[in-house]
Image (cartoon, grey):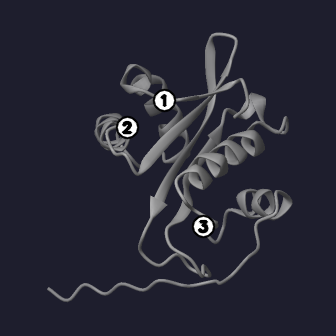
Amino acid sequence: MDRNVVFASLKDIDDITIMALQLWPNNTYEGLKEELTEILNNEKERILLYKLEDEFIGFNHVAIRHDYVEGSNSSPVGFIEGIFVKENHRGKDIAKILVRSGEEWAKSRGCTQMGSDVEFHNVESYNFHKKIGYTEVNRIICFLKNIG
């Protein structure tokens, strides 16, 4: 693992939550903090942090999935649940380093494949995934209807 990448712990929860709010702005601080605390206490998930000097500037939330991962032919599969780098540090391969570190962790847990997904409108994330060697395996459109 890169020397700037560390596994997050509960003491880092506020820093992670602040960054996560930038990635998922439709959430509340309290809600994300609660969810991230659960993640940090789950053996099948890790949050990797990129530390530059005394500041965390990015994270990669990775998980081990035993359910079907779109396009995969193995189980378990490592999965990038969310990746974020502060805007003023983008374009410096930090996200790539975080992804590689997550892949190493997943491989050490018996995974031979790594999955991820992006929202349809997120062209920047789509291009990033393609650039670092991920292959598009499917596109889906999800529907929902209220029935009650």
The mark found on residue 46 in the picture is none
- Image quarter of residue 132: bottom right
Circle 3: element type: loop
Q: Residue at image x 44%, y 22%? A: 12
Q: Which mark is residue 117?
A: 3
In the rendered structure, find residue 8 and report the number of the disc placed on it.
1
Q: Position of residue 27 (x, y in %)?
A: 38, 46
Q: Earlier in the sequence, mark 2 or mark 3?
A: 2
Q: Position of residue 87 (x, y in %)?
A: 72, 34
The 10 Å Cα crowd at callout 2, few under 14, some 14 to 19, many 20 or more, is: some
* Residue drawn at point x = 66 percent, y = 67 percent: 121
At label 1, which amino acid type do we have?
Ala
**Neighbour tally class for label 3: few under 14, some 14-19, many 20 plus, Cα within 10 Å:** some
User: Residue at (78%, 56%) from the top-left corner?
Assistant: 128
At x 62%, y 16%, the residue is 55
- Name which residue type carries label 3: Asp
Label 1 crowd bin: few (<14), some (14–19), many (20+), radius 10 Å? some
**Residue 40: image tag:** 2
Mark 1 and 2 residues: CB-CB less than 8 Å, in contact?
Answer: yes
Q: Could you tell me residue 53's position as x and y percent? A: 70, 11
Q: Secondary structure at mark 2?
A: helix
Report how far apart the C-alphas of labels 2 and 3 lie in the structure. Answer: 21 Å
Q: Position of residue 67 (x, y in %)?
A: 41, 74
Foreground mark, 3 or 1, reads: 1
| Residue closest to the eye, 105 or 24 | 105
Which amino acid type corresponds to the residue marked 2 in the rendered image? Answer: Leu
